[in-house]
Structure formats: C-alpha cells, structure tokens
Image: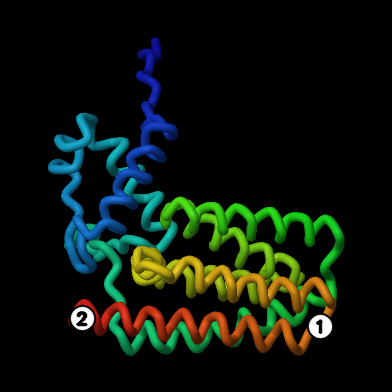
Amino acid sequence: MPQPTTPTRTPDRGLAAGIAEQLKELIYAGEFKPGDRLNEAALALRMGTSRGPIREAIRILAGTGIVTAVVNRGVFVRQVSVSEMLEIYELRALVFGFAAERAAEHVTDPDRARFESLLDQMDAACQAGDNGRYYDLNLQFHATILALSHSKRAQRQYEDYVKELHLFRRQNFNRPGNMRTSNIEHRRIYEAISRGSAAKAKQQAQLHIEAGRHRLLKMMDDLGQ
C-alpha cells in the first residue's frame, strides 16, 4: 500500500517579496555594499523567519540584477566597475534614443495622459524628497517609452542595462536637486514625443542619459569612489 506523501512546502511568495523589498532598501541605503556576501542564516535571524523565504527573496533580487550568484561561493551584492558602468551608459543612451525616436511615431492620447500623470507624480516625489518613490516612477517613465518603441529587442537590451546599474542609479537620486533636474529632462523628452518630433525626442533622450552619467560621476567623485 503506497505511503502518503507530505506535500512540498514552498515559501510564502508574499513574505519573500516583502523581504526582497527590505533587502533592496538596505542595499540602496549602503548597509550592504557592492561585493558584500548575503548570508542566508544571518538574514533569517535578522528578519525573524526561516531560510526558505530568505532564499526566495534572494532569487527575486537576482532577477533584478541587484545581486549575483557565484557558484560554490554564495550570493553577493552586484559589483560593477566604473569602466563597465560608463560603457553601459553609452549603450543605454543609444538604445533609449532609438526608443524615444520610435515612441514619437506611435504615441497616442492615452499615452500622453499616462506620461503627464507620471511626470506630475515625479514632481510630487521631488517636492516630498521621496527618492525611493521617484526612482520607481522614473523606471516606469523609461519603460513606457521603451514599450512605445514597439521593439521587443530594444526593450530586452535596455532592461538588461538597467539591471546592471540599479545600485548606482538609485543612490544618484539621493543627491539634492538630482531628482528635479532629472524630471526637467523627462519633460523635454515627453514634449518632443508628444509633438511627434522623432529627431528631437532621440536627441533629448540621449542627452538625458548622458546627463545622468555626469551626475553619477560627480557623486562618485564627491564620495571619493
């Protein structure tokens, strides 16, 4: 007679997602720095949970590119060299410029309403000094432009670049004035897209990425990195 089997338990996805969010904020705040190893047992003790949800949370973060797994060594906060970062920014500028150019050809009135809503929300985040909220909305703004490019390949490439730069870019918005300056640039991109001016949209999108790179380099210089 077959013996009853115990159902396999899977970590609570809601709990794991919540832990992933907490870990992400700790990484962004600098408590875990690039190159630091994430210890499952220590994190489980800190979060007051078992190692299962911690393991699932780490998998979630690995999917965003914030952490990376090294075979037989463990999971580490993503580390990108300055030279790699600069190269990724150059590639981002090219892909984002292409996407904005194409977006100007496909934009509709509902798209314009979404852009305006995002820009207003980002202005509010600037006013409140809420850099976490601003960063999330900023990602949505860029993703909306990539979606309007109607190019799945451009979207995939851009998402890969963004994953590699999350830690750098998120900390960049902690600097006073960077959010507001960034959103002024967003409005210029949107205005060109809204008018259907493809060449101008491409130019403003590339200038925005280049300006972001300069702001990041200045922040790193000020911090002596």
Question: x, y (%) of residue 153?
Answer: 65, 74
Q: Position of residue 140 (x, y in %)?
A: 59, 59
Q: In percent of the image, x 43 and y 34: which residue is there?
A: 13
Q: Quadrant of residue 97?
A: bottom right
Against 17, is 164 above or below? below
* Residue type indicated by callout 2: Gln
Which residue is under mark 2?
A: 225
Q: Which residue is mark 1?
A: 197
Q: Quadrant of the C terminus?
A: bottom left
The residue depicted at 35 percent of the width and 45 percent of the height is 20
Using the image as rendered, state which of residue 161 and residue 218 is in the foreground: 218
Instruction: Give the crowd class for mark 2: few <14, some 14-19, many >=20 residues within 10 Å.
Output: few
Residue drawn 62% across and 71% down? Answer: 186
- Taking 210 as reference, is 12 left or right? left
Rendered image: mark on residue 77? none
- Which of the two residues, 27 or 189, is positioned nearer the viewer here? 189
Residue 134, percent across and down? Answer: 49, 57
Residue at image position (20%, 30%) is: 48
The amino acid beneath tag 1 is Ser
Q: Nearer the viewer, residue 86 or 185?
A: 185
Q: Is residue 33 above or below residue 136?
A: below
**CA distance for labels 2 and 1:** 39 Å
Q: Can you say which quadrant of the picture contains the N terminus?
A: top left
In this rendering, the answer to whether 173 lies above or below 88 is above
Q: Residue 15 falls in which quadrant of the image?
A: top left
